Each structure stands twice: as structure tokens, then as C-alpha cells.
Amino acid sequence: MESITKNRQPAGTLRAMAAKAFGAAQVPDGDDWVSELGHGWFNVAYRMRLRDGREAVLKVAPPPGVEVMTYERGAMATELAALDLIRAQTSVPVPEVYFADRSRELCDADWFMMEFVDADNYGMIRDTLPAPAQTGYDEALGAVTRQLNEIRGPWFGRLDGPGVPTWRLFFLEMIENLLGDGQRREVDLGFSYAEIRAVTTAEADCLDEVTEPRFVEWDLFPNNVMIRDGRIASIIDHERAYYGDPLIEAVFIGTSQPAFGDPAAYLRGYDKATLTAGEQRRRRLYNVHLGLVLVIECAYRGFTGDHVDWARARLAEAMRAR
């Protein structure tokens, strides 16, 4: 996916990064040892083949001159923290981090090197798989999400803090940050900003049911799942993680927004058959949050065309369903 947040680097800088991470002797001659991985939506990523045959992935954060949304600031630090937590507290497969650099000596942004996962991107091939295979992977994704949500946090909010004591406070802060981002770019949401603020504030009492912070991946859609030999080989792209309510996870979206697909297999894998009345209220509120992200990020990343129309339709659905 093309995005103005992708901080592409010249060949000389890529060589210098590889040398800093692995040593100059590991950088091959020629130009065919590195290529861009194009499926991401935010950071630029490169696949590298080192002289000893190992393969690695380089991720580079957006350049400082490109304005990102409030929740995306410090996203690379969030991803590194998330990877540490997942590896330490779960058996969920994630790439190993080889090297991270926040010095800005070689480029104008943070970057890190991680393990290359030799597997297929589930989101990119899902529609080509037979229905039983899709069901199996979806159930596995539900189970992986549940395991991630078992990580308990010290607060609600960013993994590296500062946190807040209640989920209501953090969720409303996320909504306000999104609306502030939208207003700065004068994004047309199809609803007035005052109306969305009023709706989320009026419905916020349902958030008080959530009293224990849990690790939330939030962005765990099929495009962030790598599969191989009938199993999930790895999950990738963890820069949106935080401590919050597990019900805001992607596997639950379809329970109240059919455009995201049938959630039945995800729910079986997660071992959650139905949502309570209170959970249904929260999920509708989370769909408004997701709709805001989808619409407003189009302005910040330079997305145009059908994707913008699709995003606006999802926000409209969420607002009508409240």
C-alpha cells in the first residue's frame, strides 16, 4: 500500500544500516540483496539477504517532516515494547528483533532489524484458500488474540506510559485525539464533530465495566498474520498496541459490523460464543472509534479513491448502529 509515511532510504544508507546491525562483512556486493516489502500501510520495510545467507527485515519509521496522527507518534517504540512483552509472556510467534537504533545517525528516523518470516501473508491469500482452511486460520487467529489479551497491564494507555486509571478516560482521550487530528486537516466525516463527541460522551458509561487493563493488539487483522504449513507462523506490525479492553480487538468487529466479515470462526477460537448487552454497547462505540481512524488516516497518509469511500461508509454504519 502506498503512503506518504513510508520513509524510503537510498541504497547507501541501507548498506550502512545493515553494516551497523550485522557488521560490514555481512553486507553483500551488488544491489540484489535488498528489496522493499510493499504490503505495509505505515512504515517502510525492506527484505535483506546477508552474506552468510540469513535474511532480515528492516523497518524505518516515518520521516519527522510528515505529520502523523496523534496515536501514531512513537509507534516504533510501541512495536518494540509489544514484541518484548509477547515474547516474554506468551507462546504467540513473533519475529525476533536483531538490532534497534534510535540515534538518528544514519537516517532521520528510528529503525530496527528483525527476523524475516518465510511464510505467506494470510490477508493477501485468504480469498484464494478453500473455506475449511479459512475457517481453521480464523479460529487460530481468535485463539492467538485471546492469548495476547491475557497479558495484564499496569494501567490503561500506551505500553510505555504514562497511563491513566480507567478505561473510560483513555478511550475518550483516544476519541478526542482522533477528532483533533481530523479537525486539523478539516476532514469531512459525514457527521459534525460535535455530534460524534456528544455520542461518545453520552455512551461512555458502558466503558466502566472494564476494570482490568489487558494487552490489546488492536490491529490484528489477517494482513498482519503470516501462515505456513497450516499454522500461524508469526504475527507482525505491533505499533498500535496498548493496554485496554480486549473487546476492541479486530476479531470482534464483525459481531456488529458485517462489512468486516463473519466473526463466527474468530469467536470460536477466542472461546467466546456471545456478547452481553453491555459488551454490545461497548462494541458499537468501538466501531465509531474504528470508523474515525479509517476516515481520518486517509488524509494523513494520502489515500484516495475507493478506500476513502469505503472508510466513510464504515463510519456511517457505526454511527447509525448506536
Image (cartoon, grey):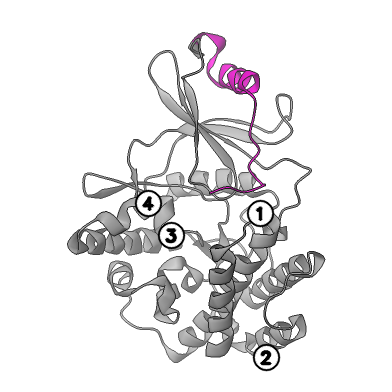
Pointer 1: residues within 10 angstroms few (<14), some, or many (20+)? some
* Residue stretch in magenta: 1-25
- Label 3, label 4: how far apart the Cα atoms are: 11 Å
Which mark sits nearer the N-terminus, 4 or 2?
4
- Label 1, label 4: how far apart the Cα atoms are: 21 Å
Task: Mark 1 and mark 4 in contact? Answer it, CB < 8 Å.
Answer: no
Task: Mark 2 and mark 1 in contact? Answer it, CB < 8 Å.
Answer: no
Please, what is the three-letter code of the amino acid marked with disc 3?
Phe
* Residue at the (30%, 75%) spot, across then down: 264
Which mark sits nearer the N-terminus, 3 or 4?
4
Magenta run includes residue 170: no
**Can you say which quadrant of the picture contains the C terminus?**
bottom right
Please, what is the three-letter code of the amino acid marked with disc 4?
Met
* Residue at the (55%, 50%) spot, across then down: 41
| Residue hosting label 1 | 301
* Residue at the (72%, 53%) spot, across then down: 68
- Between 141 and 37, which is closer to the camera in this rendering? 37
Could you tell me which secondary element the residue under label 1 belongs to? Answer: helix
Q: Which labelled disc corresponds to residue 287?
A: none
Q: Which labelled disc corresponds to residue 221?
A: 3
Residue 126: quadrant of the picture:
bottom left
Compared to residue 105, the image places residue 71 above or below, namely: below
Which mark sits nearer the N-terminus, 1 or 4?
4
Q: Is residue 161 visible?
A: no
| Residue hosting label 2 | 202
Residue 206: quadrant of the picture:
bottom right
Could you tell me which secondary element the residue under label 4 belongs to? Answer: helix
Pointer 3: residues within 10 angstroms few (<14), some, or many (20+)? some
Q: Residue 13: image x %, image y %?
A: 65, 22
